[in-house]
Image: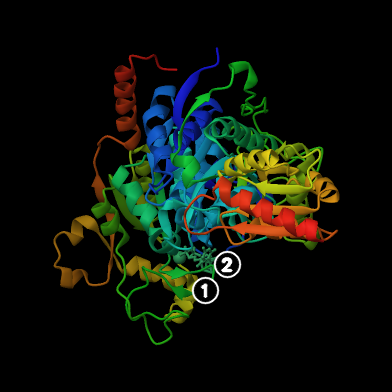
Amino acid sequence: MAVSRLTKYLRQDRMPHVWCPGCGNGVIMKAFVDAVDRESLDPDRIAVVSGIGCSSRVTGYLNFNTMHTLHGRAVAFATGVKLARPEFNVIVMGGDGDMMAIGGNHFIHACRRNMDITTIVFNNNIYGMTGGQYSPTTPTEKIASTSPYGNVENSFDIVKVAMAAGATYVARSTVIHYAQAVQFIRNGLKHKGMAVIEIMTNCHTYYGRYNSLSKPQDMLNYFKTNTIQLAKAKTMSPEEIGDKIVAGEFVNVDTETYIDRYEKMREKALAAEGGERE
Amino acid sequence: MREFVLLQGDEACALGAIKAGCRFFAGYPITPATEIAETMAKELPKVGGTFIQMEDEIASAAAIIGASLSGEKSMTATSGPGFSLMQEAIGYAAMTETPTVIVNVQRGGPSTGMPTKTAQGDVMQARWGTHGDHQIIAIYPSNVEEVYKYIVTAFNYAELYRTPVIFLMDEILGHMRESVYLPYESEMMVVPRTGETGLAEDDIFHPFEGDDQMMATPLVKMGKSRFHVSGLVHDESGFPVGTPSDVSRLLRRLDNKIRLHSDEIVIYDEFMTEDAEILVLAYGSVARSAMKAVKMAREDKINVGLFKPVTIWPFPSTRLRQLLKKVSAVIVAEMNLGQILFEVSRLNKRGVKLEHLGKVDGELITPQEILDSISRVKSEIMDL
Ligand SMILES: Cc1ncc(C[n+]2csc(CCOP(=O)(O)OP(=O)(O)O)c2C)c(N)n1
Ligand code: SF4
Ligand SMILES: [Mg+2]
């Protein structure tokens, strides 16, 4: 069974997990270890860093080197991890609030630097952990505990933010498109440079309940019927796409990473000094 | 050979840190600490280390903790506004017992205050700036030579006690250039970072386990250990727990590991205290003015001595209590409105006369000002 192939990547002594039954976070966690397994990565050379939120609790269950850090700051912690140990696969996981609100600045600057980090954003369009307040990705007019009459704010398109900020691998999928999600995470793990994989996931407990999709299957059905693949979306007008989810690989380019450049600069510094590398 | 070099305080801080084994620096420019970042940017690449200018101080503090947990000794440097932004991360380092060094070259505050002027307004923030109960170590040198020497101590304490260490300086100290003797190589004790230990394949390292509940186990490198760290209350395994006894055990151990070792941690200097009837207490750059003032007062035949805490936290209270038994008056000279005065008054059970010489105009307290204070106090105690 597929599960047994993957259970070794989980800290089974830490189960049961804290997530609500049917929460999409478990699907993303499984997609991640599936991707690690298919890429045959060495678990001792994987570091996963998360912030604070329901999704960020994932680090407690993953049997790698894991850091559960501060709300919004995971990307900044991970930058230190990657620069201290470039030989590690460094992965950041967290929520839409964690990454796009309080951590938005760190997110865009890691993209700009093309820091070699694989970032997986669990986008449930809500602050799950604190009980369903609107997040930067809550669509306008949707209900949350702090937008009881409908959200008046515009929302972020995470893919567009990542692209504009300079991420060199950008993809989006949903928890119902499991195989695609695994493929994108694999591509992100293989990618050298800043990879951003946004995965739409269900917080039926809050987002769903407030917006007439209160069962997990309601939300999964929503993802199923409202997702358009990128190739198809390219043939459609923005009006036709509307508020549908566009899944696919938006960017996949190979350019120098921060570390590549730093190492070149180091040679320069040593040459100027006429010194030897220690 | 002891090297004799001309160094600025900020430069000495950076070079001493590299000597102590610091190989990762993340920072954000701010007067009067910027020269530390600039020196690190220039020097770290040459010794195999990495410098990064982050997007803000929150990110800088996060990055140095990430780097330290991954196995590199790390540091950041800032001043008031940036130090305020770092507080949440400092608490995370305390909670996860991550060794790292945070330098605060103090300038006038609150808020943007006086960027290019000196102050000592953050000594209490260094102690209590982050939320929750925790201990902290804060070291405050008073000249450039001490900056070089004590930044190494700061790194050593960070490793030994597995804690963030705050290294306080002030604008005068950061920007002052002095000719200094660098210590002999043999005089420099550097506590190394423990490497990846001989773990078996499936061992999950318990990052906080120790045979002695008072001490911290050294931090091993990330790798086979596959450890988990969290800012949530956790047990020895590093994983979250929640029973009242677990919570209390962790918080008390974090407190004990520093508080019960304060006698080993504290550093202070004394000058002419044997027969002193008046004691001047000063730290940081003010201690230099105080030293001069004490010498001048001695020429006027006033029996005065200097007590200079180097570790501001833990505060050298044991020794100060002894001195408080012998002297008739204490003058606390500091560039704030009474932060260490408050600490001294807590210890002053006998009610020795306490005089505060606090200055907050951005200028250094001069030897003459301290001498005037000494003379005044002298005449007052004679009148008694
Ligand atoms: C500095 C700080 N501010 C606020 C919080 C409270 N808080 C915890 S999780 C969270 C939001 C979580 O939302 P998201 O990142 O989308 O994760 P989710 O729970 O939805 O997976 C907030 C506001 C905090 N822990 N720290
Ligand atoms: S509150 Fe929402 S995001 Fe959090 S565990 Fe429950 S379903 Fe998942
Ligand atoms: Mg969320």
Q: Element under label 2?
A: loop
Amino acid type indicated by mark 1: Thr
Q: Element under label 1?
A: helix
Disc 1 crowd, CA 10 A, few/some/many (<14, 14-19, 20+): some
In the rendered image, residue A106, in percent from the top left (x then y), is placed at: 39, 53
Residue underneath mark 2:
A20
Please state the quadrant of the image where ligand 3 appears. bottom left
Which numbered tag is attached to residue A205?
1
In the rendered image, residue B198, in percent from the top left (x then y), is placed at: 67, 24
Viewer-side residue, A248 vs A269: A269
Viewer-side residue, B136 vs A144: B136
**Which quarter of the image is occupied by the N terminus of chain B?**
top right
Q: Chain of mark 1?
A: A
Question: Does the closest atom of ligand 2 sit within 8 Å of the Cβ of label 1?
Answer: yes
Above or below residue B86? Residue B165 is: above
> If you read the primary sequence from the N terminus, does the residue marked by circle 2 or circle 1 appear first?
2
Above or below residue B111? Residue B216 is: above
Amino acid type indicated by mark 2: Cys
Can you tell which quarter of the image residue A124 is in?
bottom left
Viewer-side residue, B341 vs B193: B341
Please say if the residues under marks 2 and 1 sit with CB atoms less than 8 Å apart. Answer: yes
Question: Does the closest atom of ligand 2 sit within 8 Å of the Cβ of label 2?
Answer: yes
At a point 70% along the width and 60% down the height, the residue shown is: B342
In the rendered image, residue A168, in percent from the top left (x then y), is placed at: 27, 44
